[in-house]
């Protein structure tokens, strides 16, 4: 499931032009320039129930500080997208999708949130760290896909389905031609659903999972059908874990806080 491939170019967010830090070319084997990898963070938050028992003015002030902090994000350093999970999962309220070439920039925002008064009322039940990386499975169908796959520029679509993904160890013991054949079937299924854009990010050695996948679409029914069809492919037998799954709706932070409290 984690490596269905679709090719898409740069996109814009619903909040305006997506910030995209400039990639620095680095030497690669053979002397060809290589795209610099991005660090990807999917951070999920839950507002504690105690917050809603505070006086309304305190709630309004603290939530306003959070909106202001998110709004001050420097898009030359980090792309930041905000998603609501209100009503789609009971254990999270919103998700911040952070993309940067430096881990420091991801940490700076988290630290700034911790320093806000509302920081004492925000839980982070899930947080995933990954990197962008070129996939070798699509070389024969799209040998020049480096920029698209190594530099994520998401945000054009309303819905985002996010989950960590782990394959069985048996998968990695298969020969490369065998794995390529299995992935060819996977890719063929994925190309039938052009409305669904996949962002595959890699976590080997960085976090507990091997991949974090983020499927963007305006048509949730297409995504449901895609996942159901992929269950019937040979590759599905090598899936060890692909939960929890988060249904996220791209929403400005100012609107998310209105879903969280009466402000």
Image (cartoon, grey):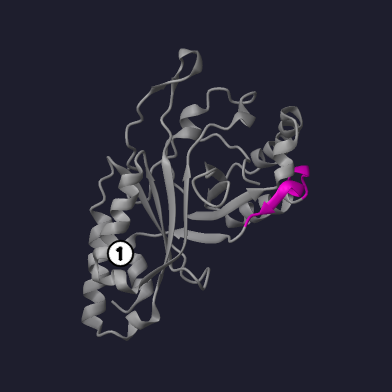
Q: Quadrant of the C terminus?
A: bottom left
- Whether residue 193 sits left or right of residue 234 in the image: it is left
- Whether residue 254 sits left or right of residue 123 in the image: it is left
Coordinates of residue 79 in the picture (x, y in percent) = 35, 45
Pointer 1 residue: 254
Coordinates of residue 247 in the picture (x, y in percent) = 53, 61
* Viewer can see residue 243: yes
Instruction: Tell me what residue is drawn at x 58 percent, y 60 percent.
Output: 245
Coordinates of residue 202 in the picture (x, y in percent) = 53, 42
* Viewer can see residue 16: no
Q: Quadrant of residue 136 in the image?
A: top right
**Relative depth, front residue between 197 and 47:** 47
Q: Secondary structure at mark 1?
A: helix
Above or below, 177 relative to 105 = above
Instruction: Tell me what residue is drawn at x 22 percent, y 79 percent.
Output: 58
Instruction: Tell me what residue is drawn at x 30 percent, y 69 percent.
Output: 119
- Whether residue 130 sits left or right of residue 78 in the image: it is right
Residue 241 inside the magenta-drawn segment: yes
Above or below, 242 relative to 58 = above
Above or below, 159 relative to 47 = above
The crowding category of the residue bearing disc 1, from other C-alpha atoms within 10 Å (few below 14, some 14 to 19, many at least 20), is: some
**Relative depth, front residue between 201 and 220:** 201
Q: Which residues are magenta?
A: 232-242
**Relative depth, front residue between 12 and 130:** 130
Q: Total number of numbered labels?
A: 1
Query: Residue lying furthest top in this view?
Result: 30
Instruction: Tell me what residue is drawn at x 74 percent, y 48 percent.
Output: 236
Residue 238 inside the magenta-drawn segment: yes
């Amino acid at each position: 499931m984690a490596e269905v491939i679709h090719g898409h170019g740069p996109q814009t967010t619903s909040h305006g032009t997506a910030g995209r830090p400039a990639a620095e070319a680095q030497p690669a084997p053979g002397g060809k320039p290589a795209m610099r990898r991005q660090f990807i963070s999917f951070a999920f938050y839950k507002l504690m129930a105690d917050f809603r028992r505070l006086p309304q003015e305190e709630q309004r002030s603290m939530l306003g500080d959070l909106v202001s902090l998110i709004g001050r994000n420097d898009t030359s350093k980090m792309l930041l997208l905000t998603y609501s999970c209100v009503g789609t999962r009971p254990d999270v309220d919103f998700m911040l999708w952070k993309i940067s070439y430096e881990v420091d920039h991801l940490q700076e925002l988290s630290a700034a949130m911790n320093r806000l008064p509302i920081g004492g009322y925000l839980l982070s039940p899930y947080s995933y760290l990954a990197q962008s990386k070129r996939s070798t499975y699509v070389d024969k169908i799209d040998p020049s896909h480096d920029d698209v796959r190594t530099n994520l520029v998401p945000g054009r679509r309303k819905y985002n389905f996010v989950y960590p993904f782990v394959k069985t160890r048996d998968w990695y013991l298969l020969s490369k031609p065998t794995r390529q054949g299995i992935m060819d079937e996977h890719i063929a299924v994925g190309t039938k659903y052009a409305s669904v854009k996949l962002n595959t990010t890699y976590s080997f050695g960085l976090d507990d999972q091997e991949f974090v996948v983020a499927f963007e679409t305006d048509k949730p029914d297409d995504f449901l059908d895609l996942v159901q069809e992929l269950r019937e492919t040979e590759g599905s037998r090598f899936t060890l874990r692909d939960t929890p799954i988060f249904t996220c709706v791209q929403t400005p932070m100012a609107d998310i806080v209105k879903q969280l409290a009466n402000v």
